[in-house]
Amino acid sequence: MTGSGVSARFLIVGPQGSGKGTQGVLVAEAFGIPSVSTGDVFRANISGGTELGQKVKSIVEAGDLVPDELTTELVRDRLSQPDAALGFLLDGYPRNQGQLDDLDEFLRSRGESLDAVIELIVPRDESVRRLHQRAVEQGRNDDTEEIIANRLAIYERETAPILGVYRDRGIVAEIDGVGSLDEVTARIFAALADRGFKPVADAAASA
Ligand code: ADP
């Protein structure tokens, strides 16, 4: 359940290597809402060898975007689960204008809308440095030099512009993503609190 009885429909956006996956999970845990990461869902399907995994494997491994229809359907299904009724934390979706429109339409059909967009701001050389480090530590096979460059280019071309749309709606919290993990988490919670979103105490305590 969400803090103070209000909805908590959040999106976290940031370039590859910004730490959005890690921070997204922390926010979701503290608010008692599901974290919905399209990248995680695709990776789980690829390693599980499912039909969806087989369809998207070569696309994800090249660092390209999975077709919008497939991604949107997956997100709609997930957000239709009962645990997402009052809130969710989207990570990695929407990533372009088409997906933004799809999400708007879906939420509107349910009388809902996004409450806050957490934008993690990390300079390009810092995110590239972190991705190289992650490549060494985790061996994600889309973390090679060429594929990282492709993913960052897609981010800058397709994903960064959608922030302008959300900015015009007044829902973007701009967070400096450079610093320790705890410092960045604290900045996110402070920015959400400024907007009236406070985590539930018991969820925060067990997070
Ligand atoms: P990163 O942001 O570091 O690239 P993600 O885990 O968010 O990592 O995504 C990994 C890959 O999954 C992407 O490169 C892309 O192939 C696919 N993917 C994730 N989200 C989407 C999306 N919303 N639309 C299309 N493809 C996606």
Image: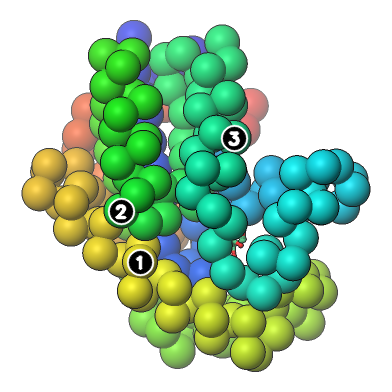
Q: Is residue 47 left or right of residue 33?
A: right
Residue placed under numbered mark 3 in the picture:
74
The Cα–Cα distance between marks 2 and 1, rounded to whole angstroms, is 7 Å
Whichever of labels 3 and 1 marks the residue nearer the N terminus, that label is 3
Instruction: Check disc 2 and report the residue beneath it.
Output: 97
196 vs 68, left or right, is left
Give the structural element (helix, strand or loop) at label 2.
Answer: helix
Cα separation between marks 2 and 3: 17 Å
Instruction: Please indicate, yes or no, whether residue 83 appears anywhere in the rendered image.
Output: no
- Label 1: which residue? 158
Residue type at tag 1: Glu
Kind of residue sitting beneath label 3? Leu
Q: Residues within 10 Å of mark 3 (few under 14, many from 20)?
A: some
x 37%, y 56%: residue: 96
Q: Earlier in the sequence, mark 2 or mark 1?
A: 2
Q: Is residue 194 above or below residue 204?
A: below
Instruction: Respond yes or no on whether mark 2 lies under 8 Å from ligand 1.
Output: no
Residue found at x 76% / y 60%: 57
* Residue 49 image position (x, y, % from top left): 89, 48
